[in-house]
Image (cartoon, rainbow, N blue to C red):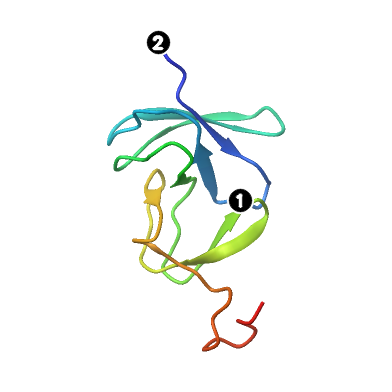
Amino acid sequence: MELKLALKVDDLDNVATIFANGIVDGAKVEVRDKKGNMEEITVHGDVPYGHKIALCDIKKGEHIMKYGESIGAASSDIKKGDYVHIHNLEALRGRGDLEGGNQ
């Protein structure tokens, strides 16, 4: 059986990056972190190679953390295992309408 792997890079991360092809709704992936911890997560939705899944439930407005940094905020509630991308992630950097958004 082919290993379907996702990586959590930083302890602060609430998403992991998929490093496998053929991840479809209901697939199970093995999430690993830098400490060697492993967790199996069932994926909701089809997720392309290199894209993200949620490691826990994320409420609307909460920061999406990848590589220990905020990459945006959840634009809707996200469940553990959900595909995280532009349909449920709102970028916060480079926006002039937010205080501090000119980073």
For the residues labelled 1 and 2, the Cα–Cα distance comes to 28 Å
Q: Quadrant of the N terminus?
A: top left
Left of 59 or right of it: where is 67? right
Return the x and y of residue 33 as percentages of the image width and height.
Answer: 64, 35
The residue positioned 68% from the left and 47% from the top of the image is 11
Q: Residue furthest top?
A: 1
Residue at horizontal 41 percent and vertical 55 percent from the top: 85
Question: Image height check: is 78 above or below 75?
Answer: above
- The residue singled out by tag 1 in the image is 13
Circle 2 sits on which residue? 1
In the visual, does 95 lie left or right of 4? Answer: right
Who's the residue at 29% across and 33% down the image? 24
Q: Nearer the viewer, residue 35 or 83?
A: 83
- Foreground mark, 1 or 2? 2
Position of residue 62 relative to residue 35, above or below, is below
Identify the residue at horizontal 45%, vertical 28% (top origin). 20
> Of the residues shown, which amino acid type is indicated by label 2?
Met
Figure check: 80 above or below 31: below
Q: Percent x, y for residue 65?
A: 58, 57
- The quadrant of the rendering that contains the C terminus is bottom right
Among the two numbered marks 1 and 2 on one chain, the one whose residue lies closer to the N terminus = 2
Q: What's under tag 1, amino acid-wise?
A: Asp
Q: At which x and y percent is residue 62?
A: 50, 67
